[in-house]
Image (cartoon, grey):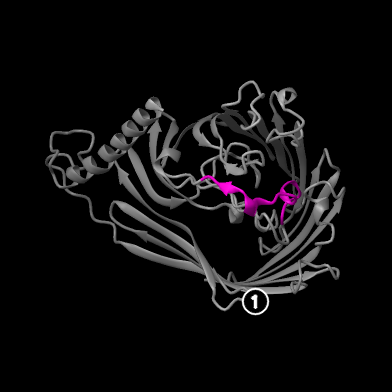
Amino acid sequence: MKFVNTFTILIISSLFIAIIFPLYAENGDFDDGSFFQEIEENQEEPASVPSRLDISGRMELNTRYAFNSEGLGEGEEVRSIPELRLDLDYRGKKADLRASGRIEQVPGEKEASGQVDEAYIRYYARGFDLEIGYMKPIWGPGDKVHAVDVLTPIDYSDFINPDYTERKQAETMIKLNIPVNEGLLELVYLPVFTPDTVPWEGVWTPMDVVTYNVPALAEEQTADFSHSSFAFRYTESLGAFDLGGIYYMGYYRQPTVSFTNETLSYDRINMIGIHGTAVTGGLTLRAEAGWYASDDFQGDDPEVRNSEFRWVGGFDYNIPVSRFNINIQETGTLLLNSDGIEKTGDVQADTPTTANMLIFSLRDSWSNDTIEPEITLIMSLENQDYLIKPSLTALFQDELEFSLACSLFGGSSDGNFGHFNSKDFIELSISYIF
């Protein structure tokens, strides 16, 4: 704990210096040719870049039609939700501001609900830039699935129906980006820890938590200084390869449920990860791998989660017919030292040793990228359950977008996909983009 506190103080002090010194440099207090000096002596000051505010977004009406009488839940056989999204980008002389959010009106609710997707500033200095605020960067090259993206939580309240970026939730962080030779070093400090959003009840409750009586459990509070997290990543391009290495010192974002202690807690982890891409011709290779080391190295502590190994690997290939693209990925988790898990009383007593998914996607683009058909198959290899999702998106005059998608669940009811085999639906979205 003494090491963690010392490390915390050093990180905060470094970031404070990184923020304050450029401000002094801007006022002329450093005129000795130092790192922060912006203008050389006898050099004319460059013309100021005009500030600009860009406002964009979309107004969307999203409607789901259930296939059967069970539907999406009582009173939800047809559910139509209007939503307004706004994105604001302000470009200043030496700093940018980014803010985005959404507001929607759920049928039956008296008041509309909304959320801030991102809100942060980026300050540009000589040799680095600094981002401070509420943001959700993505780490790892996987296509809508990741093994080393650890900086922000995921919202599982609508299962996997939205895209990955839609399910990500922003986190408060301070992020320093430093170019190093031909690469980039990213240093991140997260003052508080926000766990994943898990629906413990309702229509889209996952199979692996549907039997938990969570309201009776005491949840660990994580919005405090003791739950601060740190991470860094270094990425570099070497010819046809883009490579990256990650270290994260924080917490599992998935909760550890202990019925023995009647608690819902979040275990500490150290994650060491690597990722890379390689491009040759029309073929793009992607890979991510992360070792999530918990405090239970031997796997025999019944109150602490075991360490685990996660990975994503796959490729996509552009077939020289139309704009046809085929994408195949495999993602999985290996629970380490699973032989030390007790059959009863252990927080991972019912956790399988391996969990693998195969993702197969076909995409095309017609009429100058204005019509885009796609079909995706996601299959759990252990449980033999699946999700099939065909979709068609059409854009008119760069403003009006129509999207029609279908989600079909099937296979073993013991899996997270087969668990929803009575929740098939068609989804129609009509959007005005501005």
Q: For residue 79, what is the image quadrant? A: bottom right
Q: Which residues are magenta?
A: 205-220
Q: For residue 409, what is the image quadrant? A: bottom right
Q: Is residue 55 left or right of residue 399?
A: left
In the rendered structure, does residue 295 fall within the stretch colored magenta?
no
> Can residue 1 be seen in this snapshot?
yes
- Residue at 70%, 33% (x, y): give it: 346
Q: Is residue 378 left or right of residue 129?
A: right
- In this view, which residue lies farthest toward the top? 298
Q: Nearer the viewer, residue 166 or 264?
A: 264
Q: Secondary structure at mark 1?
A: loop
- Pinpoint residue 299: horizontal percent, then vertical percent: 66, 24
Q: For residue 175, what is the image quadrant? A: top left
- Pinpoint residue 133: horizontal percent, then vertical percent: 39, 51
Q: Is residue 253 left or right of residue 364?
A: left
Q: Is residue 400 above or below residue 355?
A: below
- Pinpoint residue 355: horizontal percent, then vertical percent: 75, 36
Q: Is residue 223 above or below residue 14?
A: below
